[in-house]
Amino acid sequence: MALKPTAFTMEEAASIPLVGLTAWQALIEKGQLKKGQKVLIHAGSGGVGTFAIQLAKHVGATVATTASAGNAELVKQLGADIVIDYKKDDFAAILKDYDVVLDTQGGNALERSLRVLKPGGKPIGIAGPH
Ligand SMILES: NC(=O)c1ccc[n+]([C@@H]2O[C@H](COP(=O)([O-])OP(=O)(O)OC[C@H]3O[C@@H](n4cnc5c(N)ncnc54)[C@H](OP(=O)(O)O)[C@@H]3O)[C@@H](O)[C@H]2O)c1
């Protein structure tokens, strides 16, 4: 049994197992992310992204993430090493030789994410078809 932290509403608490499991399956089970590797996590300020950043740092990976400027400080506090403002900058022109990309956006973002991967790198998409 786990007790709900008093600062969380029931709805907020109910989201934790799902985003946690999603981040675990994507980064650890599918991505096989390891210490010393580089991972790009799209939408680091979102439900999945906030969890995924912390999990990737726990593993010992270097984390780049996309977020809007207003959330840059949040994702840095969660452990992100590199923060890219997706409204201003093109992540595909900045990052290279990544081992894993966790894409929560799909479509164009997933396609452009292939450019930041090293040969044999793993793109993990969880957005589904648009
Ligand atoms: N939540 C789950 O448990 C779960 C499970 C499986 C699959 N999924 C899928 O995963 C995706 C994300 O889910 P979520 O719950 O994490 O979403 P969310 O909490 O609604 O997060 C949305 C985030 O997307 C960011 N964003 C919007 N446009 C972006 C762009 N062009 N590039 C980078 N970031 C962008 C926003 O960042 P800013 O606010 O900083 O602008 C916002 O923080 C969805 O497709 C969902 O269906 C979610």
Image (cartoon, grey):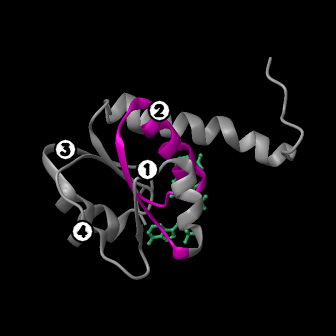
Q: Earlier in the sequence, mark 1 or mark 4?
A: 4
Q: Earlier in the sequence, mark 1 or mark 2?
A: 2
Q: Is residue 29 above or below residue 55?
A: above
Q: Is residue 11 left or right of residue 78?
A: right
Q: Which mark is residue 121?
A: 3
Q: Amino acid at mark 3?
A: Gly
Residue that badge 2 annotates: 58
Q: Earlier in the sequence, mark 4 or mark 3?
A: 4
Q: Is residue 50 magenta?
A: yes
Q: Which mark is residue 94?
A: 4
Mark 1: secondary structure: loop
Q: Are marks 1 and 3 in contact (CB under 8 Å)?
A: no
Residue ID at (54%, 57%): 75
Q: Earlier in the sequence, mark 1 or mark 3?
A: 3
Measured Cα–Cα span from mark 3 to mark 2: 20 Å
Residue that badge 1 annotates: 126
- What stretch of residues is rendered in magenta? 42-69
Measured Cα–Cα span from mark 4 to mark 3: 17 Å
